[in-house]
Image: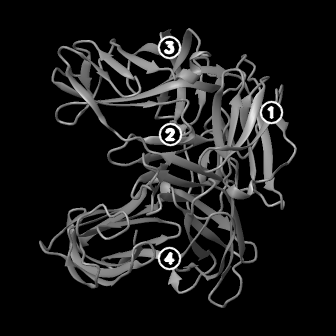
């Protein structure tokens, strides 16, 4: 059975897509005796972690998105960030899944190395209504960029297979393979499994995602034995290298893998293919791979963290992207026996360093690379984090939030932290620093600063005065059921927060990983006026292994709010004592909570 990922806090190891995914560790290329060069085994597990950030189509952080790694669940905060730590994930294909209303479900996959923290940046694709047609007569739907769907008459069924003849609403999106956003929006990563079971690297010439719904919002699909026609536009920069016939691959959400299924034919400046089901479909030329490792430092021998890296295949001008880890290291799979170009990019995707590499006939490690960053592009953020005793924090981190949906978790060394950002030249970069002491579970107030280039010293930040601990304790018939972060996950949204999604209402929830893959959870919502007081409970529930409590006996339950802090740094504290229907039996439930506001 395929499993995915991990569970919560600090330090950054980032992954790299070199036309397929590159990660922070190298693996051997081998056959299994049956002629398969890279057999797939997603069942070998390691323990590691993930740092991530989720942004929208405008590059703004997405708060309140649900992120899952197997049975583990997190919710993005106001900065769009999430973290998992110390849980099991597939060594060959660790995966995170992101869901948010109004957007296509997103997946990011990576090769996992034991003890490492993988970094992901995920840009959600909005679900835009592309049009509609009558299932009885069929129809044609086109979208900006040139993507097109053609559905013959009477080829649509509902999810159960029953014939559907009503209005069909189409949500469709095209992923431009020449876009610099490709590594942020691609489903999974650019590795594919052939029909023979061989893992290959993929050079994409375009992707389309399609979903069909009925007039009542129900999911629809292509009828068994029928097909629909998809047209994939080929960007002008890739047309000269586009083969006449290309393999077609679909994204299998159950395994988070691209799988080979048919071919597409080049017609003019497009690829045209017939598909038997809807998913994300991908036109790709596949290639054999080897493992490549490297490390990158600046002129002061300081590792460059979260550096965006790009490798170009000279043979067809397709690209792969990724980012260095917290030690400036990155490893992964690249095309075998090909001339390649290694490039490092600033935050605006401009090339600041370029080097020809390869071809490689086998696994390789590049000599350490020293990057002399142009002064206009170099912004160094440094400072010291102390604890409540005014001594330097030895087990902690600086969490640095940068405008444009970027975030960095920089571990301290005897209290000191340093982050070298390779940024766009010109203009002022605004950022916020939060100091955290993991040993005492304390955090600082946010410190805001800005700069253009050079060194910005934010001074001494005291991680003290605000506990970073969040908790919710439910007592049912005298038996306590506890949620606490760390390690549990919490999220809070309200109309007065930075990205409030509710109107005059506060809603928060928590998730606890129980035994046997079971997730325990609670939620509570109430009207707010940003002040302490007594408020009606609008909704509340708790699901535990032995019971489910989803409603109140009293028709007018209330919650006592004793503290209502500022968004981003303050906490909502309170309690309630109410009779609830616990698995059908009325029982007294006492609850105390302290939740960080988003």
Q: Which residue is mark 1?
A: 356
Q: Which residue is mark 4?
A: 469
Q: Which residue is mark 3?
A: 262
Observer able to see residue 44: no
Q: Quadrant of residue 456?
A: bottom right
Name the foreground residue: 36 vs 227: 227
Q: Residue at the location (34% across, 39% down)?
A: 127
As measured in the structure, the alpha-carbon distance from the residue carrying label 4 to the one carrying label 3 is 52 Å
Label 3 element class: strand
Labels 4, 2: front one: 2
**Is residue 69 depicted above or below 246 in this figure?**
below
Q: Is residue 310 left or right of residue 546?
A: right
Q: Quadrant of residue 590?
A: bottom left
Query: Circle 3: is it few (<14), some (14-19), or many (20+) Cα within 10 Å?
Result: some
Label 4 element class: loop
Name the foreground residue: 340 vs 533: 340
Rendered-image quadrant of the C terminus: bottom left
Could you tell which of marks 3 and 2 lies nearer the N-terminus?
A: 2
Q: Are marks 4 and 3 in contact (CB under 8 Å)?
A: no
Name the foreground residue: 238 vs 47: 238
As measured in the structure, the alpha-carbon distance from the residue carrying label 1 to the one carrying label 3 is 35 Å
**Is residue 356 depicted above or below 402 in this figure?**
above
Q: Is residue 336 left or right of residue 426?
A: right
Q: Which residue is mark 2?
A: 185
- Residue 114 in percent (x, y) is at 70, 51
Give the farthest residue toward the bottom.
389
Q: Residue at the location (47% across, 62% down)?
A: 79
As measured in the structure, the alpha-carbon distance from the residue carrying label 3 to the one carrying label 2 is 23 Å
Labels 4, 1: front one: 1
Q: Are marks 3 and 2 in contact (CB under 8 Å)?
A: no
């Amino acid at each position: 059975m395929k499993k995915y990922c991990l569970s919560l806090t600090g330090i950054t190891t980032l992954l790299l897509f070199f036309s397929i995914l590159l990660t922070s560790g190298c693996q051997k290329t081998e056959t299994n005796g049956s002629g398969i060069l890279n057999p797939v085994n997603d069942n070998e597990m390691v323990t590691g972690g993930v740092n991530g950030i989720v942004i929208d189509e405008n590059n703004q952080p997405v708060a309140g998105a649900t992120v899952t790694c197997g049975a583990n669940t997190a919710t993005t905060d106001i900065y769009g960030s999430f973290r998992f730590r110390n849980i099991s994930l597939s060594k060959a294909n660790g995966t995170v899944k992101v869901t948010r209303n109004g957007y296509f479900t997103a997946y990011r996959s990576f090769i996992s190395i034991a003890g490492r923290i993988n970094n992901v940046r995920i840009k959600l694709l909005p679900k835009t209504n592309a049009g509609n047609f009558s299932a009885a007569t069929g129809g044609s739907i086109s979208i900006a960029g040139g993507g097109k769907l053609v559905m013959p008459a009477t080829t649509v069924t509902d999810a159960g297979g029953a014939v559907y003849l009503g209005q069909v609403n189409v949500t469709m999106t095209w992923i431009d393979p020449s876009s610099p956003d490709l590594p942020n929006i691609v489903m999974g990563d650019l590795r594919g499994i052939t029909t023979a079971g061989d893992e290959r690297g993929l050079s994409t010439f375009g992707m389309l995602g399609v979903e069909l719904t009925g007039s009542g919002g129900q999911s629809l699909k292509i009828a068994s034995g029928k097909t629909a026609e998809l047209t994939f536009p080929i960007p002008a920069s890739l047309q000269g290298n586009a083969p006449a016939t290309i393999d077609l691959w679909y994204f299998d959400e159950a395994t988070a893998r691209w799988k080979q299924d048919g071919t597409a034919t080049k017609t003019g400046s497009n690829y045209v293919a017939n598909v038997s089901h809807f998913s994300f479909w991908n036109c790709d030329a596949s290639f054999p791979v080897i493992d490549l490792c490297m490390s990158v430092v600046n002129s002061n021998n300081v590792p460059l963290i979260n550096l965006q890296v790009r490798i170009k295949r000279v043979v067809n001008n397709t690209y792969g992207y990724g980012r260095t880890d917290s030690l400036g290291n990155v490893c992964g799979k690249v095309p075998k026996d090909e001339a390649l170009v290694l490039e490092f990019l600033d935050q605006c995707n401009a090339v600041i360093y370029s080097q020809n590499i390869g071809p490689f006939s086998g696994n390789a490690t590049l000599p350490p690379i020293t990057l002399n960053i142009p002064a206009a592009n170099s912004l160094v953020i440094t400072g010291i984090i102390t604890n409540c005793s005014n001594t330097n924090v030895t087990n902690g981190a600086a969490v640095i939030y940068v405008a444009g949906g970027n975030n960095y978790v920089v571990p301290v060394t005897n209290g000191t932290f340093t982050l070298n950002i390779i940024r766009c030249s010109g203009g002022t970069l605004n950022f916020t620093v939060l100091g955290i002491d993991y040993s005492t579970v304390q955090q600082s107030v946010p410190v805001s600063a800005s700069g253009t280039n050079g060194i910005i010293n934010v001074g001494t930040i005291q991680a003290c005065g605000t506990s970073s601990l969040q908790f919710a304790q439910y007592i049912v018939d005298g038996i306590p059921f506890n949620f606490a972060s760390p390690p549990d996950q919490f999220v809070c949204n309200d109309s007065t927060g930075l990205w409030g999604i509710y109107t005059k209402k506060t809603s928060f929830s928590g998730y606890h990983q129980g035994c046997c893959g079971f997730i325990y959870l609670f939620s509570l919502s109430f009207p707010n006026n940003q002040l302490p007081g007594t408020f009606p409970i609008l909704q509340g529930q708790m699901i535990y292994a032995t019971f489910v409590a989803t409603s109140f006996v009293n028709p007018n339950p209330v919650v006592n709010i004793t503290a209502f802090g500022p968004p981003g740094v303050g906490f909502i504290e309170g309690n309630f004592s109410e009779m609830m229907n616990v698995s059908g039996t009325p029982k007294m439930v006492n609850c105390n909570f302290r939740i960080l506001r988003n």
